[in-house]
Amino acid sequence: MKSDIRVCAAWASEHDRPVYTLGDTCPDCGNEAVNSAPAPFSPEDSYGEYRRSLKRRSRE
């Protein structure tokens, strides 16, 4: 599922705080708005094995 919420790509240089929108452009400065969702899970995660083993140990 793709997030509909976007953030101004130039918010660090143009604004005091992130500007969120549902459109393709920032309503304040007109710059491009990019997807604000975090990166998806990667099966090539080099630390995944360690995180899963820690999770198993904490359940016990």
Image: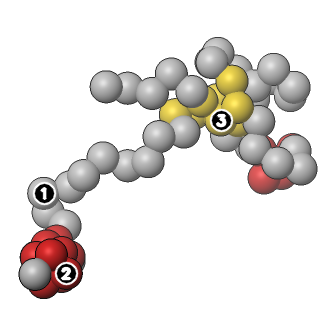
Task: Give residue 43's position: percent from left, percent from top.
Answer: 13, 57
Along the horizontal axis of the image, is 44 left or right of 7?
A: left
Q: Mark 3 points at which residue?
A: 7
Label 2 sits on what residue type? Ser
Q: In which quarter of the image is the C terminus?
A: bottom left
Q: Is residue 58 above or below residue 52?
A: below
Q: Which of marks 3 and 1 is nearer the N terminus?
A: 3
Q: Residue at x 69, y 24 (%)?
A: 21
Label 1 sits on what residue type? Pro
Mark 1 and mark 2: span between their CA atoms? 22 Å
Mark 2 and mark 3: span between their CA atoms? 36 Å
Task: Give residue 4's position: percent from left, percent from top.
Answer: 50, 22
Q: Earlier in the sequence, mark 1 or mark 2?
A: 1
Q: Is residue 44 above or below residue 1?
A: below
Label 3 sits on what residue type? Val
Q: In which quarter of the image is the N terminus?
A: top left
Mark 3 and mark 1: span between their CA atoms? 27 Å
Q: Is mark 2 on a helix, strand or loop?
A: helix
The circle drawn on residue 58 is 2
Q: In this view, does 13 lie above or below 31?
A: below
Q: Is mark 1 on a helix, strand or loop?
A: loop
Q: Residue at x 64, y 15 (%)?
A: 23
The reply to whether discs 3 and 1 touch (Cβ–Cβ < 8 Å) is no
Q: How crowded is mark 1: few (under 14 residues within 10 Å), some or many (20 or more)?
A: few
To which quarter of the image does residue 52 belong? bottom left
